[in-house]
Image: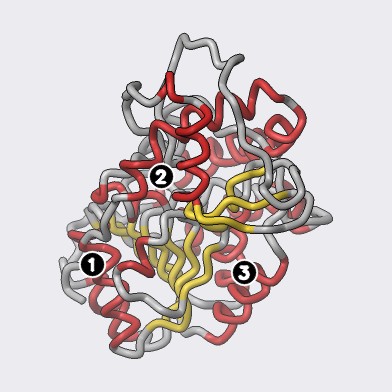
Amino acid sequence: MLKIFNKIAVFTAVNNGSAASSAWQDLPNDAISTLDIGVTSCHNLCMHDTIQSSAVSSPMDNNSLAEFVDSHPRLFVLSGAGCSTDSGIPDYRDTNGGWKRPQPVTYQAFVGELATRQRYWARSMIGWPRFGRSKPNAAHQALARLEQQGKLALLLTQNVDRLHQAAGSINVVDLHGRLDLVRCLACERRMPRDDFQTLLLRMNPAWTGLDAADAPDGDAELDGLDFSRFSIPHCPRCAGMLKPDVVFFGESVPRERVDAGMQAMNEADAMLVVGSSLMVFSGYRFAAAASRAGKPVAAVNMGHTRADPLLSLKVEQPCGEALAFI
């Protein structure tokens, strides 16, 4: 389904929601916080009602997205979890932007509670083999072709799976980090996740036969188990605490990644969102900045996005299908 949004019709709604939006601009850092989750839910309920009345309901030409890409030769692209679902990696949210499953672990809980780390790493040990074997799908390949055609200023991804790089994309910023690395919080040493998997298996042989459904963060949905005896390796160099090299909720996005994204957005002709509801501020801020700069924003996403009032074009199709023209 293609939807064109009338920006004049929703201008009042955007202004009415500006108190919440402005609050985000005043945050002292780039934390993906539990505050973000709460305010977003309230703010988006208001925006959702506006979108239903402002969308033009007449059928749109199937070439609308192709025309958008062709008319903007230097695109800033932001991708999210919906880009990787056809690779077998579950996404986080339903079509209304709500959580499909319990919210991800927070940074504060991970570093402050041994039980949280034990549960996290046990689930990760079971889920990592399948996550690590995931392959790029048609959406990743289409965006790689877009870069090869010289039409992509930067691909900023919220995903941590590195599938864009596996598909051949080069100019990529991993906004939320990468799950194939593990970082020591004390000495900053990084090690491959595969090497850490070897340590986990060696220390927890009783867990190796378990299997469970995949979860979005490269883990598995283990429920009803006692994690208190699960052993976690320490940093081989300094015995410090190890954490996946990704940005957790409640943790700050490194400033250099945000700056790289903003510079690319400023230099681009338009912004294209692929497979993201933009519910967390770390991604939404780029759509908001593009809109303030007068740049058109298009989105490919199955369902509601936080940026719906800002969109010039919305395509509600699977990402690979929508981008097949590239």
Secondary structure under the numbered disc 2 in the rendered image: loop
Whichever of callouts 1 and 3 sits on the residue coming sooner in the sequence is 3
Is residue 188 in view? yes
Disc 3 marks which amino acid? Ala
Q: Relative to 312, is 248 above or below? A: above
Q: Is residue 139 left or right of residue 229?
A: left
Q: Which residue is mark 1?
A: 323
Residue 165 image offset from top left, x and y in percent = 38, 69
Whichever of callouts 3 and 2 sits on the residue coming sooner in the sequence is 3
Query: Residue at horizontal 47%, vertical 35%?
Result: 124
Q: Is residue 28 left or right of residue 246?
A: right
Marks 3 and 2: CB-CB under 8 Å? no
Q: Relative to 110, is 148 above or below? A: below
Q: Which residue is mark 2?
A: 304
Residue 174 image offset from top left, x and y in percent = 52, 64
Number of the front mark, 1 or 3: 1
Number of the front mark, 1 or 2: 1
Q: Residues within 10 Å of mark 2 (few under 14, many from 20)?
A: many
Query: Residue at horizontal 71%, vertical 30%?
Result: 109
Q: CA distance from mark 1 to mark 2?
A: 19 Å
Disc 1 marks which amino acid? Leu
Return the residue nearer the eye: 53 or 188.
188
Disc 2 marks which amino acid? His
